[in-house]
Structure formats: C-alpha cells, structure tokens
Image (cartoon, rainbow, N blue to C red):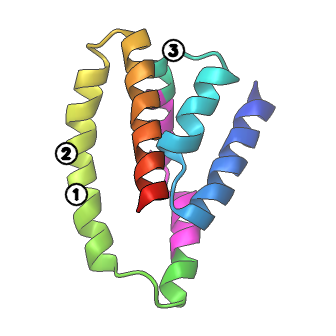
C-alpha cells in the first residue's frame, strides 16, 4: 500500500507540475480505483496530502523563477480555497459515497468537454 500511495503521489506531482492539477484529477480517482477507498476517504486523504505543500511549493518555485507566477494571486486563491474546502468537505461528508463518485465523474467529463471545445 505504501508503494502504491507513493506512485500515486509521484504521478500527481508530475502531472501537477505540467498541468497544474493533482488532487482532484489524479489523486482522488487513483485512491478510489487502486487503493479501493470510499470517495470521502479519498478526498480527505487528498486534502491532507496538500496540507504539506512541499511538492507544490517546489513546482511553484520553478514557475516563479521563470516569471509565470504572481504570488499575490496565488494567496488570494488559497484564501478562497480554504473557505471552499471547509464548505465542500462538510457537504461531501454528508452525501452518499456513490452519489459523490458519480458527481465527481460528471464534473470531470464537463471540464474535459469545456477544455476540448474551448
């Protein structure tokens, strides 16, 4: 299990560094599919992993050095994310796991279509 979790983290780190994603798109589905976690446990584990921002900080530093990061904007988003994560986690822990999994899949499909169409 430890090796699986490290592999999921490495994949999320690589894709996060390239595309700016990781938690919701890579970690959560991987934990549900491969580690056989319930959706709420997968989301909670993903959020907890992001509490230790070491991986993201290292990647963000490269973007900052290259002039592609505005720290003030990142801070404002982080403040919003803190409030949103609190509200979202309350909702997710009070929803059926199967419904949450399906809603997550629908969100991913909708985002993929939007990105594809432009």
Residue indicated by mark 2: 83
Q: Position of residue 91 (x, y in %)?
A: 23, 23
Is 35 within the magenta?
Answer: no
Question: Looking at the image, is mark 3 or mark 2 nearer the viewer?
Answer: 3
Q: Which residue is found at the position 51% from the left and 72% from the top?
A: 60
Q: Which residue is found at the position 41% from the left and 62% from the top?
A: 118
Magenta span: 43-60
- Residue 86 shown left or right of residue 117 in the figure: left
Residue indicated by mark 3: 38
Q: Is the stretch drawn in magenta largely helix, strand or loop?
A: helix
Say what secondary structure mark 1 lies in.
Answer: helix
Residue indicated by mark 1: 79
Instruction: Out of 48 and 108, give the one closest to the viewer.
Output: 108
Dot 3, crowdedness within 10 Å: few (<14), some or many (≥20)?
some
Q: Position of residue 72 (x, y in %)?
A: 26, 77
Is 54 within the magenta?
Answer: yes
Say what secondary structure mark 2 lies in.
Answer: helix
Label 3, label 2: how many angstroms apart (C-alpha)?
A: 23 Å
Residue 63, disc: none
- Residue 10 shown left or right of residue 54 in the figure: right
């Amino acid at each position: 299990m430890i090796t699986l979790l490290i592999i999921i983290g490495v994949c999320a780190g690589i894709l996060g560094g390239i595309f700016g994603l990781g938690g919701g798109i890579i970690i959560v589905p991987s934990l549900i599919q491969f580690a056989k976690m319930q959706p709420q446990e997968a989301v909670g584990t993903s959020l907890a992993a992001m509490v230790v921002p070491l991986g993201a900080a290292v990647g963000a530093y490269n973007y900052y050095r290259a002039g592609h990061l505005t720290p003030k904007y990142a801070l404002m988003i982080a403040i919003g994310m803190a409030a949103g994560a609190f509200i979202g986690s309350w909702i997710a822990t009070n929803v059926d796991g199967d419904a949450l999994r399906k809603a997550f899949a629908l969100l991913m499909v909708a985002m993929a279509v939007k990105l594809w169409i432009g």
